Image (spheres, rainbow, N blue to C red):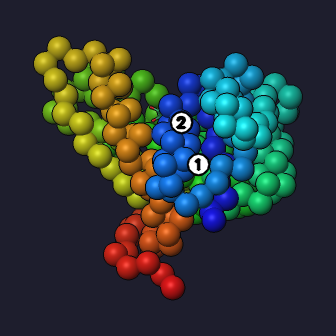
Amino acid sequence: MLKIAVLASGGGTNLQAILDEIEANNLNCSVEVVISDSPAAYALTRAKNRSIPVAVVEKSAYPTRKAYDTELVRILSGYGVELVVLAGFMRLLSSVMLDAFPMKILNIHPSLLPSFPGLNVQKQAIEYGVKFSGCTVHFVDEGLDSGPILLQATVPLLEGDTPEALASRILVEEHRIYPEAIRLIAEKMVEVEGRRVTIKTEQKG
Ligand code: GRF
């Protein structure tokens, strides 16, 4: 069973979607630990409700990004984590994490990358006037929301859309494709070659 960790800074609805799919036996993996940079993150409560260990690693306690990431690696290795799932984790990772988990870190982003990386992307999509936005699950590399793309889902923009309304419609799709992306990896159906990610139709033996 694939051992995963979820890193979240906020509400943790993506964490919840993953936990629900595991509970429904649709996802053959176990969340070994949930880590947050914020003690107030509701994601921690969601984890505790399922008796999943939590860790809070606050930015202020570490002088550099690398020192911070060294602590993340220590915790993740202690739990034998094989896949790191970023779900609204509001920190960029350094080479310390990327080297410890090469192509084993996923992120979800609420736009159709490579359009609108970064923050406040629903507002940016509305102001730009795109007709479709959506969400992207990608592997994490050293750039900002720039790693190889595993899954995407589209969401149409509506007349009079607000960033909040668009965000909540995108979240519905996030909650669908993030567990699906993890399932594909757990079932060894994903191959990455450079930027191209291939999803195999047959399960590896
Ligand atoms: C999601 O929109 C995700 O795409 C972005 O942060 C938000 C996290 O939401 N990276 P939640 O904490 O999973 O509810």
Q: Residue at x 28, y 15 (%)?
A: 162
Q: Residue at x 35, y 25 (%)?
A: 168
Q: Residue at x 84, y 55 (%)?
A: 78
The amino acid type found where label 1 is placed reads Val
Residue furthest to the front = 24
Toward the viewer: 69 or 95?
Answer: 69
SS of the residue under disc 1: strand
- Look at mark 2 in the image and give the residue it sits on: 16
Q: Is residue 145 visible?
A: no
Cα separation, mark 1 vs mark 2, equals 13 Å
Mark 2 nearby-residue class (10 Å; few <14, some 14–19, many ≥20): some
The amino acid type found where label 2 is placed reads Gln
| Above or below: residue 83 compared with residue 66 | below
Toward the viewer: 187 or 98?
Answer: 187
User: For this view, does 92 lie left or right of residue 157?
Assistant: right
Please give the label number shown on residue 177: none
Q: Is mark 1 within 8 Å of ligand 1?
A: no
Please give the label number shown on residue 85: 1
Q: Residue at x 19, y 33 (%)?
A: 156
Q: Earlier in the sequence, mark 1 or mark 2?
A: 2
